[in-house]
Image (cartoon, rainbow, N blue to C red):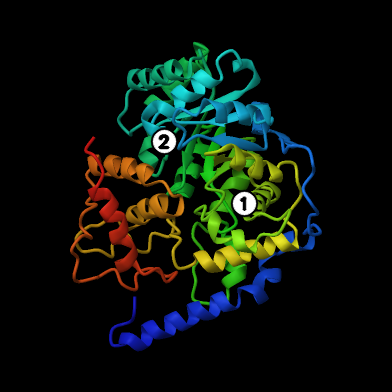
Amino acid sequence: MAEPGGGERALDRRSFLRGAALAGLGAGLARALGPLAAHAAADPGPPPASPPRVRGVRTLGRTGLRVSDIGFGSSRLEGDEALVRHALERGITYFDTAESYTGGHAEETLGRALQGRREQVLLATKTSAGPRAGAAELMQALEGSLRRLRTDRVDVYFNHAVNDRARIENPAWPEFVARARREGKIRFCGMSGHGGNLVECLDFALDHDLVDVVLVAYNFGQDPGWLSRLTRDFDFVAPQPELPRALAKARQKGVGVVAMKTLRGARLNDLRPYETEGVSFAQAALRWVLSAGLADSLVVTMTGAAQVDEYLGASGAGPPGRAELRLLERYEASAATLQCRSACRACATACPEGAPIGELLRLRMYAEDYGDPALARREAAALSAAGLRLDACLGCTHHACRGACPFGLELPALAPRGAALAAQAPAV
């Protein structure tokens, strides 16, 4: 926020610095990429004539599981069994889902599509285990997932979207995991997360040997090393500065690391005019993750066969080439005034009415950037059920959040767009 007495001059100066930062992205790209730039591949040539397929298989930490380097994310899957089979035919063997995805329909769709082919794939699913959940309750949730997936076991079972260490500290979780392992219902356990307390939760889980695999938000803009070097001379901050350290610790301990949120908001159409044959923003972003050295594999939401084929163009490839790095640079500049860095939490207490600004920005992203208002409404319904004040932005006149985002997002304009979606959400 502007300092007292600074008024518009302070805000104007900050706006000028942000503008200068974006204008200087091109000049700062080489030094921003650090060691990666030295190994940047030559610009890729025309794509191969054969259909794209998985060309990279990796070992998921100490689990020993061999997984496709690009996994199928099902957060928006509902009924499209042909899409699942298309991914399998292209060589994808790692399928990620959760009991909450599309109200359980994602698990059901995977179960039907993979019927009779269970031995060809690795299945991961998730449950949101609360800090006071009991072992019996957790077993009931797992068994519900197994029924929907039409299987007797899952390969990895995650504690979903952990952003509160109390959920990992709950003694019922390891008790449940031990029983589920004995009964052959899960092979390995893990935690997933992408919130502001992610590193704290990761450290606790790793230090107490509570996980075999972690699923975390990690992309070219999430990595503070990349972002900090790119913008070190400007008025920016790097979110999650300890994330690379925590992921390096996981790898040192043999814990498998799977990356998600790999497309940094997935505003793919913004970059289409700048893509040339053989160069795709999505492929560049995925190749960055796979070559950065901190993830064994990644999952990305797939909603159509063309997406599957595009994303698989990054499988088994080396680091992004120069043309692809320029796409990442251009995306960072274009997304800078819309993309919430949820982990920074600078706006968490900006609203005197208690509006969860970060969550509202996420709802806007789902509806507008992902092009999936139904997903936004489902998420809004769950947040409302949890007691969050999603309607606090509607009719706001004080705009107390203005200037609270260190990245320059116009919160008084963006947050109400999420609140309007929440107002359309059905009660749960």
Can you give x and y, in whole percent of width and height, for residue 377 in the image? 31, 44
Left or right position of 380 against 267: left
Residue lying at 42% horizontally and 49% vertically, measured from the top left: 195
Q: Amino acid at mark 1?
A: Ala
Task: Say which label, 1 or 2, has the lower sequence index.
Answer: 2
Q: Quadrant of residue 94?
A: top right
Query: Can you say whether 397 is above or below 241 in the image?
Result: below
Q: Quadrant of residue 405?
A: bottom left
Q: Which one is in front in this view, the residue at disc 1 or the one at disc 2?
A: 1
Query: Can you say whether 408 is above or below 224 in the image?
Result: below
What separation in Å lies between label 1 and label 2 (alpha carbons)?
33 Å
Q: Amino acid at mark 2?
A: Ile
The image's mark for residue 282 is 1
The image's mark for residue 87 is none
Can you give x and y, in whole percent of width and height, for residue 169 in the image? 39, 35
Instruction: Indicate the quadrant containing the C terminus: top left, top right, bottom left or bottom right.
Output: top left
Left or right position of 316 against 234: right
Residue lying at 66% horizontally and 60% vertically, measured from the top left: 275
Left or right position of 131 against 63: left
Query: Can you say whether 325 is above or below 145 in the image?
Result: below
Residue lying at 41% horizontally and 46% vertically, measured from the top left: 372
Is disc 1 surrounded by few (<14), some (14 to 19) or many (20+) residues within 10 Å?
many
**Residue 196 visible to the viewer:** no
Q: Nearer the viewer, residue 17 or 309?
A: 309
The image's mark for residue 168 is 2
Can you give x and y, in whole percent of width and height, for residue 91 in the image? 69, 30
**Residue 55 visible to the viewer:** yes
* SS at badge 1: helix
Is disc 2 surrounded by few (<14), some (14 to 19) or many (20+) residues within 10 Å?
many
Can you give x and y, in whole percent of width and height, for residue 175 in the image? 42, 21
Instruction: Indicate the quadrant containing the N terminus: top left, top right, bottom left or bottom right.
Output: bottom left
* SS at badge 2: helix
